[in-house]
């Protein structure tokens, strides 16, 4: 990876299992299991900022910032609190990008955190914006948007795992889903999804947008220090 976050993403401990980033499938809330990926991405981002960026502490997340890994009970409680107060989920839909940006900004304002976000960048600035955020040690929330205009279709994007030989093998698929980018090079994005480390091939992501989605719903949360 040519540019990486300087620290690991938050890890969650669930029994003997330890995640890379949060995993909404571990939540005790059924609605959150189905469509809580945006909240997980935002919570991981806020924990990371609280740990590694000056002036980003928040009382509600102090216990999560201080502990690594974070016990699943604390993480689940914080995720549900974040959803109720800042990032309300639409049943079966989850969270759109504009709501994600608005909820992140409201949390930052109320906790005097010197960051602001907006949803989406132009195609010309897409990769450079991801690279810029990572170089400033800010995780990037990326959306693999729903199929549009035929939103009921389930055309998906492949996610890869890297094996011991360094080769990339298809391992999972995603659609209408948020992931967190922690690194990139000229071909790959390194991401966290469902509590595991995966990779997305950059050109495949662009082909997915052109064939099955669009830039409005398949984009990034651009986060910058005020």
Image (cartoon, grey):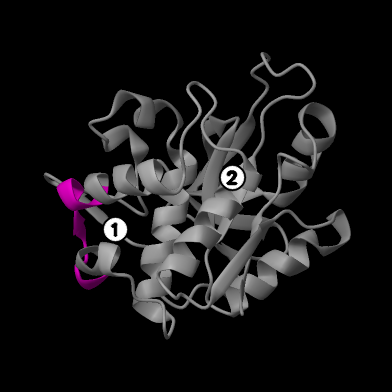
Farthest residue, direction right? 124
Residue labelled with disc 2: 99
Tag 2 secondary structure? helix
Residue drawn at point x = 25 percent, y = 44 percent: 76
Residue 173 visible in this rendered orientation of the protein: yes
Left or right? Give the position of 200 relative to 127. left
Residue 181 among magenta residues: no
Residue name at image x 49 percent, y 43 percent: 38
Quadrant in the picture for the C terminus = bottom right
> Residue 206: where, in percent of width, then height?
79, 44
The residue range painted magenta reads 65-75
**Disc 1 target residue:** 11
Residue at 46% over, 51% down: 41
Q: Is residue 56 above or below residue 180?
A: below
Which numbered disc covers residue 147?
A: none
Q: As rendered, which of 46 and 199 lies closer to the eye?
A: 46
In the rendered image, residue 61, in percent from the top left (x then y), is placed at 28, 64
């Amino acid at each position: 990876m040519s540019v990486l976050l300087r620290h690991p993403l938050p890890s969650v401990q669930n029994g003997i299992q330890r995640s890379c980033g949060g995993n909404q499938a571990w939540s005790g809330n059924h609605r959150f299991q189905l469509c809580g990926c945006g909240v997980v991405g935002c919570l991981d981002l806020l924990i990371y900022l609280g740990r590694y960026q000056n002036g980003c502490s928040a009382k509600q997340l102090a216990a999560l910032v201080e502990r690594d890994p974070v016990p699943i009970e604390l993480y689940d409680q914080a995720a549900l609190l974040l959803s109720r107060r800042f990032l309300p989920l639409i049943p079966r839909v989850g969270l759109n990008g504009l709501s994600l940006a608005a909820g992140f900004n409201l949390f930052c304002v109320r906790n005097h955190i010197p960051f602001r976000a907006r949803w989406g960048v132009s195609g010309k600035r897409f990769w450079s914006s991801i690279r810029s955020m990572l170089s400033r040690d800010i995780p990037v929330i990326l959306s693999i948007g729903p199929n549009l205009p035929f939103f009921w279709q389930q055309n998906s994007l492949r996610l890869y795992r890297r094996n011991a030989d360094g080769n990339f093998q298809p391992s999972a698929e995603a659609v209408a889903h948020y992931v967190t980018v922690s690194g990139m090079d000229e071909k790959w994005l390194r991401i966290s999804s469902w509590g595991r480390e995966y990779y997305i091939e950059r050109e495949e992501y662009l082909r997915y947008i052109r064939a099955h989605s669009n830039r409005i719903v398949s984009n990034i949360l651009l986060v910058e220090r005020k």
